[in-house]
Amino acid sequence: MTVQTKSKQRGISFIGLIFVGGVLAMAGVVAAQVFPTVLEFMAVQKAVQRAAAGQSVVEVRSLFDKQTEVDAISSITGKDLEVGKQGDKVVVKFAYQREIHLVGPAFLTLKYTGQSK
């Protein structure tokens, strides 16, 4: 007479599956809200690079404002830029932040900074 031993079941329980699914869903919602701000940051970087071709502060800000209209940038304007010179090159710096409401009193604050090359 042979006795069969019980094998341990392996895997995830239904409650564990629900928990993991909930965590992944929350991470997906936050990522979906962060993604547009990253795209806007890349558009700002590109606009700053193009604006750095200007020779004066007024010209740089004007070029940037025109580019913001084309790329639909709303987080920063030409007045927010810091324009300076390093040697012969015009250097344009920027910094701004975006807040994303998560739940209740909780916010996710994203701080973006950069400069022209």
Image: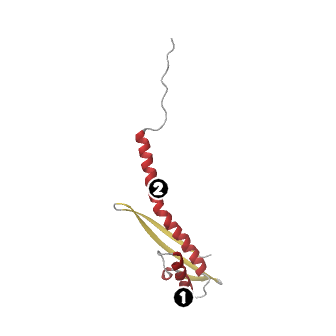
Q: How is the image coloured?
A: secondary structure
Judge from the rendering whether residue 115 lies leftward or rightward of residue 26; answer left or right: right
Q: Is 98 placed above or below 30 here?
A: below
Q: Which mark is residue 28?
A: 2
Secondary structure under badge 1?
helix
Residue at 49% in and 80% down: 77
Residue at 47% in and 66% down: 110
Which residue is the site of mark 1?
A: 58
Q: Earlier in the sequence, mark 2 or mark 1?
A: 2
Q: Is 10 placed above or below 22 here?
A: above
Residue at 53% in and 68% down: 39
Residue 63 location (% of width, % of height): 56, 83
Kind of residue indicated by mark 2: Gly
- Location of the C terminus (image quadrant): bottom right
Kind of residue indicated by mark 1: Val
Q: Quadrant of residue 67?
A: bottom right
Q: Quadrant of residue 57?
A: bottom right
**Residue situated in front as seen by the camera: 5 or 90:** 5
Q: Residues within 10 Å of mark 2 (few under 14, many from 20)?
A: few
Q: Is 23 placed above or below 96 here?
A: above
